[in-house]
Image (cartoon, rainbow, N blue to C red):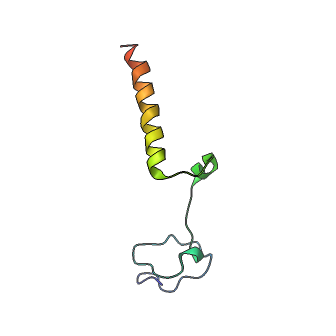
Amino acid sequence: MSQSVGPLVRYRCYTPGTDVEGDIEAMSLWAGQGVGLVKKLQPAASIVREINAEAEAILKRLAHFG
């Protein structure tokens, strides 16, 4: 149920807002094009560590050009 939209119909094309309550599995939850790039499930902290390590490696490579 949404105060601004009213009852939500299962599988209806509606992006849930902050005022929505109820069964979220029945709502549209957009994943986007990037979902196809997911290769493994991992905790967010692990993802952040990977991103950080990759950024550090890139910055070190770029430092050699400067």
- In this rendering, position of residue 56 left or right of residue 11: left
Query: Percent x, y for residue 5?
Result: 46, 81
Q: Nearer the viewer, residue 33 or 59?
A: 59
Q: Residue furthest top?
A: 65
Left or right, residue 6 beside residue 10: left
Left or right of 64, for residue 36? right
Which of these two is toward me, 27 or 41?
A: 41
Question: In the rendered view, does 58 fall on the left or right side of 42?
Answer: left
With respect to residue 14, does 44 lie above or below? above
Give the residue displayed 40% in from the left and 29% down from the top. 56
- The vertical placement of 32 against 21, above or below, is above
Determine the residue positioned at 44% across, 49% down.
45
Image location of residue 28, percent across then percent down: 57, 70
Where in the figure is residue 30, as x and y percent of width and height? 55, 62
Q: Residue at x 54, y 51 (%)?
A: 42
Picture quarter with the C terminus? top left
| Residue 24, horizontal then vertical, whole percent | 53, 75
